[in-house]
Image (cartoon, rainbow, N blue to C red):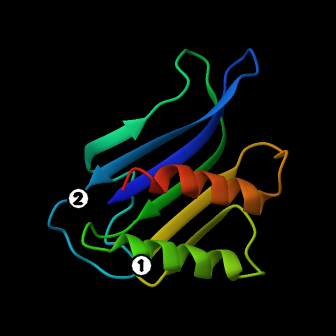
């Protein structure tokens, strides 16, 4: 599965979070995935688009890539392990357990990057 959430802003200043979940079917792996999301984004399962319009700017992005067979509780546990790493700073790509994570900031957040990272994850995880 490939799950991403992006904080976006329209030119008028309105902000929102867009999330998308795709499936990779029966492909199984653990740890480092055999491909990057850009190479195989998967088949759309569901998405949540909160803000329509042209000219959206991506402010921050969260991505998770793991086998479709990975349990949601495992994903949450791996996320919490990742956030607990005090050496972590964006931008980063990190494999922890069965999950591949990527996070980037494209602006100075109102919140700490940890809070932004958590809010993007929380919004996306509801698609599972």
Give the residue drawn at x 27%, y 42%. 44
- Whichever of callouts 1 and 2 sits on the residue coming sooner in the sequence is 2
Picture quadrant of residue 23: bottom left
Q: Which of 114 and 94 is in front in this view?
A: 114
> How would you rate the neighbour count of disc 1 (Cα within 10 Å): few for under 14, some for 14-19, many for 20 or more?
few
Give the residue drawn at x 56%, y 56%. 122
How far is mark 1 from mark 2, CA to CA? Answer: 18 Å
Give the residue drawn at x 67%, y 74%. 83
Point out the image quarter for the C terminus: bottom left
Q: In this view, does 128 lie above or below 35?
A: above
Please tell me the numbered disc located at residue 74.
Answer: 1
Does residue 61 appear anywhere in the picture? Answer: yes
Q: Residue 51 at x, y = what percent?
A: 56, 24
Picture quadrant of residue 17: top right
Does residue 41 appear anywhere in the picture? Answer: no
Please tell me the numbered disc located at residue 42.
Answer: none
Is label 1 in a helix, a strand or a loop?
helix
Give the residue drawn at x 63%, y 32%. 16
Is label 2 in a helix, a strand or a loop?
loop
Q: Residue 115 at x, y = what percent?
A: 74, 58
Please tell me the numbered disc located at residue 24.
Answer: 2
Q: Which of 80 and 61 is in front in this view?
A: 80
Q: Looking at the image, is mark 1 or mark 2 nearer the viewer?
A: 1
Q: Which of 72 and 21 is in front in this view?
A: 72
Q: Is residue 127 above or below residue 30?
A: above
Q: Is residue 43 left or right of residue 112?
A: left
Q: Residue 25 at x, y = what percent?
A: 17, 60
Q: Is residue 88 left or right of residue 43?
A: right
């Amino acid at each position: 599965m490939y799950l991403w959430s992006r904080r976006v802003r329209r030119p008028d200043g309105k902000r929102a979070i867009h999330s998308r979940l795709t499936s990779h079917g029966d492909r199984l792996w653990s740890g480092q995935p055999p491909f990057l999301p850009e190479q195989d984004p998967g088949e759309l399962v569901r998405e949540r688009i909160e803000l329509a319009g042209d000219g959206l700017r991506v402010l921050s992005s969260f991505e998770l890539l793991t086998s479709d067979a990975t349990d949601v509780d495992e994903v949450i546990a791996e996320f919490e392990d990742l956030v607990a790493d005090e050496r972590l700073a964006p931008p980063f790509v990190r494999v922890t357990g069965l999950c591949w994570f990527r996070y980037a900031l494209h602006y100075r957040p109102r919140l700490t990057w940890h809070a932004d990272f958590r809010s993007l994850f929380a919004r996306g995880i509801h698609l599972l």
